[in-house]
Amino acid sequence: MDLLERLITIFAQNGYLAVFTALMICGAGLPLPEDVTLVAGGVIAGLGYANVHAMFGLCMFGVLLGDSAIFLLGHHYGARMMRWRLVAKVLTPKRYAMVQEKFDRYGNRMLFFARFLPGMRTTVYVTAGATHRVSTVRFLLIDTLAALISVPFWVYLGYLGANNHQWLMKWMHRGQNSLWLLVALVLLVLLVLWWRQRRQRTNDC
């Protein structure tokens, strides 16, 4: 709660620029939770310091820009990044090897679900870039689809709970589980749509 309160104060005083800067810090893998940052952005919108829809758009842009920067660093510098002092603190050789093995096994699915795994996100994106098996366009597409679930969830949660912190904290604690349920629901809907489209094609033939 202390971190959330501090972010709300900073964001209320400095507006959209402060939110964007915080999201760049999150994207760099530094210890600032993205979900708390997004909620704080939603809260200041709920308190009247920003427009919630503009905040959502800004947060989407900030999140995707930060993710893309990490991916492109991995793409251009690969395993050499492991020797950078700042990167080495976040991306240990053991973690890099583990994620590389998972990425080789699961590929695009790993990229999608990484957005919902805060402790692994940076490592997965660096690894995806370093393997050169994912194009920048494909990365952006997968990351955008995942962000369209997570970003509005946290921003609008903050907006709705701006004047009721007890309710907000309760749903923040429930948030990760609720977010996974939302992901499952979206995937189920996509699966049903795909199945119906395939069945329609079969009937047409």
Image (cartoon, rainbow, N blue to C red):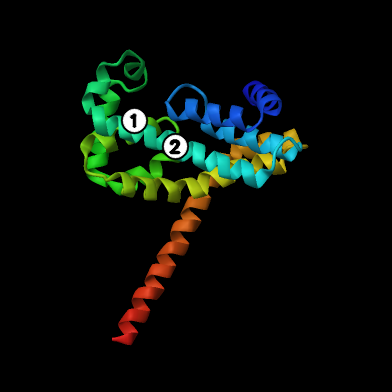
Q: Residue at x 41, y 36 (%)?
A: 67
Q: Taking the image as drawn, is residue 7 in sight?
A: yes
Residue 175 lies, with reference to residue 5, above or below; the image says below
Q: Residue at x 67, y 34 (%)?
A: 169
Pair 2/1: label in front = 2
Q: Is residue 92 left or right of residue 115?
A: left
Q: Amino acid at mark 2?
A: Leu
* Tag 1 residue: 123
* Tag 2 residue: 65
Q: Position of residue 10 (x, y in %)?
A: 66, 23
Q: Amino acid at mark 1?
A: Thr
Q: Residues within 10 Å of mark 2 (few under 14, many from 20)?
A: some
Q: Position of residue 124 (x, y in %)?
A: 33, 35
Find residue 100 and name its label: none
Q: CA distance from mark 2 to mark 1?
A: 16 Å
**Res 160 quadrant in image:** top right
Residue 84 lies, with reference to residue 27, above or below; the image says above
